[in-house]
Amino acid sequence: MSNGTIRGLLLSDKQADRVVPPTGFTAQLTVFVAGAMAFMAVFALALSLASGRLADRWSQELAKAATLRINAPAEQRAAQTETALKLLRQTPGVAKARALSPEEQAALLSPWFGPDLPIDALPVPQLVEVTAGEPGYDIAGLRLRLSAEVPGAVLDDHTRWREPLVDAANGLRRLGLIAILLIGGATAAMITLAANAALAANAQVIEVLRLVGAKDGYIAGAFVRRFTLRTLIGAAVGVVFGMIGVMLLPAASDEGGFLTGLGFRGIGWGLPLLIPVLGAGVAFAATWAAARRRLKELS
């Protein structure tokens, strides 16, 4: 289809537009479907973007973090902790090494054992927070040095549970994108059904137009213009309500975890504005294909 044909289909033609009834079942169905699908697309897009941010944050933050666990008798724990800290601070690529205080370790265990946990009376290992710098440190070499100088030390670089979390977040991002594609496909299917219904209802009008010399492109253009405009209006309304809904979601917080911060950020607020344009494009293509196919059947 040439650019001239597309411009001709989109330019208003009041006489041709009378072929398509301005109100009725097909008009209401098209506007409602476009609005509902656009509303859901906004939330699917917000979920996809939030999942991508979460995957990136987990990947970056957890890749630099490690935990050193010192399992030693109480009388040797302080000495081994000091030896481990000295070794870590001398290791190239380690930006920071800090032993957690008893209060911090109790806070880590409080979600499972409550706030009144007597940590001093329990054989809880000493935890050391290790933060990597650039370009990082040799994990295998560091483990060998720790095993030689600090027998009770175990270095955990969080790989075992970091990768599943990042994979899960990336999976949610892919599901969001798939949902957007399914929404677009469902929109195209519903608009095709509505266009076919309008074409069937106006079969006699189409026959009269052909008798007076109207071309199929002229007739199809009337349906394309009307359904594209309906979809654009419905999708715009749906996006407005969807963005209002996203704005009302809870803001990001550490306490809420992934259940908060599902909104857009920065330039991301402009992405939903593309949904009505893409919806109109889907309606244009679906209506054009349906009109041409139906007109051939009526020949």
Image (cartoon, grey):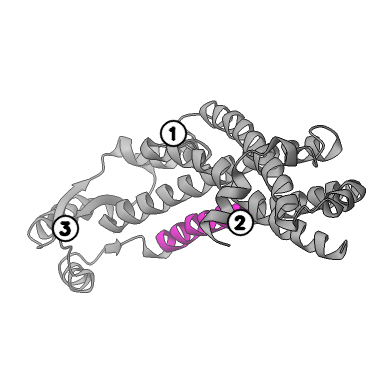
In this view, the residue in front, 2 or 54, is 2
- Report the residue marked by disc 2: 181
- Report the residue marked by disc 1: 252
Q: Amino acid at mark 2?
A: Leu
Q: Is residue 167 above or below residue 244?
A: below
Earlier in the chain: of badge 1 and badge 3, it is 3
- Residue 85 horizontal side relative to residue 182, left or right: left
Give the class, few, some or many, for how many residues have Cα within 10 Å of label 1's Cα (few <14, many ≥20). Answer: some
In this view, the residue in front, 213 or 269, is 213
Q: Quadrant of residue 88?
A: bottom left
Q: Residue at x 46, y 57 (%)?
A: 165
Which secondary structure type mostly characterizes the magenta part of the structure? Answer: helix
Q: Is residue 248 above or below residue 42?
A: above
- Report the residue marked by disc 3: 84
In this view, the residue in front, 164 or 215, is 215
x, y percent for residue 23: 81, 32
x, y percent for residue 293: 78, 63
Foreground disc of the pair 2, 3: 2
Q: Secondary structure at mark 3?
A: helix
- The residue stretch that appears in magenta: 161-180
**How far separated are the C-alphas under marks 1 and 3?**
36 Å
